[in-house]
């Protein structure tokens, strides 16, 4: 695991955008899993701008959406699908055969999970996962106390996730379940970037990086990954005992 601390959120975002460009230059048909959320938004915007200005060829990449709120349609501006379509799929002009997102409205969520797992295997696995961290240490919707080996699955959301998740929605929304890639996918991915930004992530970043590696803090599993990269701004790193 490599840890990098940046002066601020913008520096962090530029670095992640640059890493994405380098990944695609190295492997034009990269399979990249993207999280939605507040943390990666600037990085994605910088990335899509760089793609345009530097003519990065994204025609052969495959995009995979990390997770989705169950029961929330893709037209809802709080859905992960809406976020990924607006910030990445549309600006990158990805055709329908170049991405897969979970359908949180599916009447058969088990099949939805199986289809995602088949899609990931059919692509030959994930080259890079770009993930954020929840206030409770979750990655995607891999909540504390889940399983470190699961692949796609549906999970009840804990209270922290349902409460914090309201920030994505324009009106109060019932959030009870999530559908998500699993930590099994994360462990198998060739590379992982975990981003954390802001003072409100400082406590969980200390637990993630300095506490025990445990499913009680799902993000701590990145410490076991052979090629993981943790990028934080100063605020998110502010409670670490060592910051040099
Ligand atoms: C959400 C999502 C995650 C996201 C995390 C952090 O609930 N399920 O995929 O990475 O929480 O989100 P944010 O970046 O908005 O803090």
Image: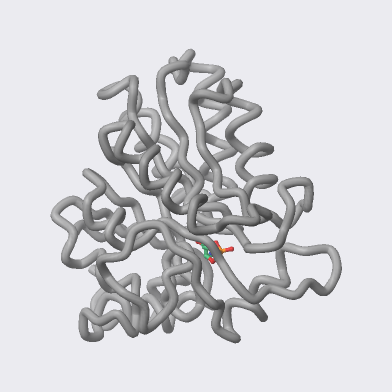
Horizontal side, residue 176 vs residue 240: left or right: right
Identify whether 81 is placed above or below 244.
above
Q: In the rendered view of the protein, which quadrant contains the N terminus?
A: bottom left
Which residue is more in the foreground, 88 or 242? 88
Near-viewer residue (134 or 65): 65
Nearest the eye: 224 or 55: 224
Q: Which of 70 and 171 is in front in this view?
A: 70
Residue 158 picture location, percent across and down: 55, 83
Q: Residue, x 46% and y 53% (percent of image)? A: 113
Colour mode? one colour
Q: In which quarter of the image is ligand 1?
A: bottom right
Q: Residue at x 34, y 70 (%)?
A: 219
Q: In which quarter of the image is the C terminus?
A: bottom left
51 to the left or right of 176: left
Q: Give residue 10's position: percent from left, percent from top.
A: 52, 50
Question: Relative to residue 86, is residue 196 depicted above or below?
Answer: below
């Amino acid at each position: 695991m490599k840890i990098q601390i940046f002066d601020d959120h913008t520096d962090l975002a530029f670095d992640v955008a640059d890493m994405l460009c380098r990944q695609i230059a190295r492997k034009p048909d990269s399979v990249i899993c993207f999280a939605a959320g507040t943390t990666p938004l600037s990085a994605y915007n910088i990335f899509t701008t760089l793609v345009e200005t530097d003519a990065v060829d994204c025609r052969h990449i495959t995009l995979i959406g990390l997770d989705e709120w169950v029961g929330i349609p893709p037209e809802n501006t709080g859905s992960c699908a809406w976020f990924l379509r607006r910030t990445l799929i549309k600006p990158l002009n990805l055709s329908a055969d170049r991405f897969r997102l979970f359908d949180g409205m599916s009447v058969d969520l088990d099949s939805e999970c199986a289809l995602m797992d088949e899609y990931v295997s059919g692509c030959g696995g994930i080259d890079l996962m770009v993930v954020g961290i929840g206030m409770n240490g979750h990655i995607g919707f891999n909540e504390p106390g889940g399983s470190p080996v699961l692949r796609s699955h549906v999970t009840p959301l804990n209270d922290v996730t349902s409460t914090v998740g309201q920030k994505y929605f324009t009106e109060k929304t019932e959030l009870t379940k999530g559908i998500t890639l699993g930590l099994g996918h994360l462990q198998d991915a060739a590379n992982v970037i975990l981003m954390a930004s802001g003072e409100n992530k400082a406590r969980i970043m200390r637990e993630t990086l300095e506490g025990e590696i445990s499913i009680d803090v799902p993000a701590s599993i990145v410490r076991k990954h052979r090629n993981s990269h943790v990028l934080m701004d100063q605020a998110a790193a502010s409670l670490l005992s060592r910051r040099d």
